[in-house]
Amino acid sequence: MDKTKIFHLITSLNIGGTEKFLLTVLRNLKNKYDFSVGYLKERGHIADEIEKLGIPVIKFNFFSLVKYLKKNKPQIIHTHLYRANIIGRIAGKISRTPKILSSQRSIDGWKIFCHVWLDKITSHYCNLIIANSQAAKNILITREKIPSQKIIVIYNGVELPEHQNIRTSERIFTVAYIGRLHKEKGVYLIPKIAKIVCKKNDKIKFLIYGDGPEKGNLQLKVKNLKLENSVIFMGWQNNLENIYSSINILLLPSEEESFPQTALEAMSFGIPVIASDVGGVSEVVEHQKTGILIKSKSPESFADAILSISQDYYCYHHFSENSKIKATIFTVEKMINSMDNIYNNYIKK
């Protein structure tokens, strides 16, 4: 029996939360569905990982996309990220693709009226929009005026590690940022936070894992503040177990966040999270239970939280144990089962 064709369209395939979500879905359901993947801008590292699964990855513009959909006739087109959502919905409508699904996996605070209007208008072509947090769903309801019944929340999942070690007995206490080095992630606060912390405790080190347009500015700030020995740039690393086995606290000073995948990953290893209380962060991180949520952009607030946790073993242990328990709610298995049920339901309709 032939497998159902499902075509995924994404804006780019660089390393990011949405791209990792797509890769996880493809990896776990590739034996059940006939997947293909298209992208509009940058190929990125995730494209290589998808092709290793035996799934074709093709770059498209609008016209080549319409032609492809008409020729290959997938049962479902599933779009990810803003540009792919808009273009994919229109192309799917023109090509008469039976079912059109979209994902909303970011807050997109950069949108102005025209972006919101396009999202709202093209959402009429969608059968369903899949949000990765209640915060993301609420944004679509209040800003884009999309009916709530057209939106479903499916949380990200995480593979639970076999071993999680509490690392507070080490001589050096490490605080890590993991993710894209973009302004919206609040990374510009890290040097100021580090300066305050290291002035009071020079045994605390900051590790920055990731890359992006803010890297040069961050390196300059670190140099100007004479923090080269305290703030270390680690670049991109794919081995999460190695990263999370070597850090004590995850720092997430984001300006906006739909669902903080790195926070969930860290919590699964028993690592407390200090994060901005924005978007869907509080749906994962519980204040004074699995970490500390900061309501301001004040570097002092983040620094005080880091110092308080690092100096109190019992508080750290409390947060660590609660983090591991909380992470068990968000499993990859639950996420994949939910996605599989959606695909099945729309194939049958």
Image: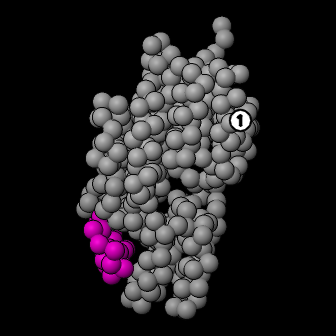
Q: Nearer the viewer, residue 128 or 299?
A: 128
Q: Is residue 335 left or right of residue 246?
A: left
Q: Main secondary structure of the magenta part?
A: helix
Instruction: State which quadrant residue 109 falls in.
Output: bottom left
Secondary structure beneath label 1: helix
Q: Residue at x 46, y 30 (%)?
A: 125
In the current view of this chain or complex, which residue is farthest to the top? Answer: 1
Instruction: Report x, y in % for residue 23.
Output: 60, 40
Q: Is residue 156 left or right of residue 28?
A: left
Relative to 28, say whether 116 is above or below. below
Left or right placement of residue 137 versus residue 159 in this view: left
Q: Residue at x 32, y 49 (%)?
A: 143
Quadrant hosting residue 293: bottom left
Image quarter of the C terminus:
top left
Look at the image and say whether residue 1 sits in the magenta stretch. no
Quadrant holding the N terminus: top right
Return the x and y of residue 230 as percentages of the image width and height.
Answer: 53, 83
Mark 1 residue type: Ser
Please give the range of residues in magenta. Answer: 291-315
Q: Is residue 160 above or below residue 7?
A: below
Q: Residue at x 30, y 30 (%)?
A: 149
Name the spot of residue 322 as percent of width and height, x first. Answer: 31, 52
Q: Is residue 56 above or below residue 11?
A: above
Neighbourhood count class around disc 1 (C-alpha, 10 Å): few under 14, some 14–19, many 20 upward: few
Residue drawn at (55%, 85%), measured in percent from left and top?
Answer: 222
Q: Nearer the viewer, residue 280 or 261?
A: 280
The residue under label 1 is 64
Say if residue 110 shows up in the picture.
yes
The foreground one among 258 and 231 is: 258
Colour scheme in use: one colour
Between residues 286 and 242, which one lies in front from this camera angle? 286
